[in-house]
Amino acid sequence: MKKALISTIEPRETGYRVAEVVDQGQIFPVSTELFWTDCADDVVQDQFWYDPTDQTIKPIPVPIPTAEENKATAMLCLANTDWVNQPDVTNPDINPHLLNHAEFITYRSQVRAIAVSPAAGNLTWPTEPTPQWSSV
């Protein structure tokens, strides 16, 4: 069990900030605006908040991405992999050259589908391939 330092002068959600999390033996004296409380081992500072109504520590909700945010993410993924379409990257007469170009084409096609028809929510994103290069 760990201890969470709660700051009553820093509101979060409908309660207070979890300002620090330490092992039981590492607590130290604090001012009256702060107090220590027991917490689970998975509690992380600033990712959880203290609810005074039931005296529990709860995770801060992660916002659900909008369709516009998912489109922006998809556009960034496409921009970050534009290099795979350069002719010299896939030319087998030039070393090194990209060996798994087809994987990148598949990946970019899946990402482009999200960019063209974005949806709100936590999407399942395709995994960007790791470039595999021919030996020199």
Image: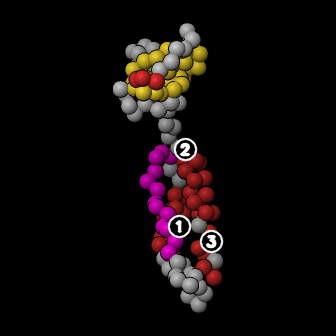
Report the residue at 59% width, 16% height from top: 9
Q: Give the range drawn in magenta.
A: 120-132
Q: How many C-alpha atoms fall within 10 Å of the one at disc 1: few (<14), some, or many (≥20)?
A: many
Q: Dot 2, how many residues are within 10 Å of its Cα: few (below 14), some (14-19), or many (20+)? A: some
Task: Measuring from the top left, give residue 13's x and y in whole percent.
Answer: 52, 23
Q: Magenta stretch: residue 31 in it?
A: no
- Amino acid identity at mark 3: Trp
The image position of residue 123, as x and y in percent, is: 46, 51
- Quadrant of the rendering where the C terminus is positioned: bottom right
Labelled disc at residue 54: none
User: Is the residue under label 2 in contact with that under label 3 (CB below 8 Å)?
Assistant: no
Question: Is 89 above or below relative to 125?
Answer: below
Q: Name the residue under label 3.
A: 83
Looking at the image, is mark 3 or mark 2 earlier in the sequence? 2
Q: Position of residue 71 (x, y in %)?
A: 57, 53
Residue under label 2, please give it.
66
Instruction: For mark 3, give the secondary structure.
Output: helix
User: Earlier along the polypeptide chain: callout 3 or callout 1?
Assistant: 3
Nearer mark to the viewer, of 2 and 1: 1
Vertical position of residue 85 compared to residue 56: above or below: below
Observer-nearest of 27 and 2: 27
What residue appears at the point 60 percent right and 52 percent down from the top-left corner? Answer: 72
Q: Which residue lies furthest to the bottom in this view?
A: 93
Camera-near label (3 vs 2) is 3
Q: Is the magenta stretch mostly helix, strand or loop?
A: loop
Q: Which amino acid type is shown beneath numbered disc 1?
A: Arg
Instruction: Please say whether residue 58 is visible from this viewpoint.
Output: no
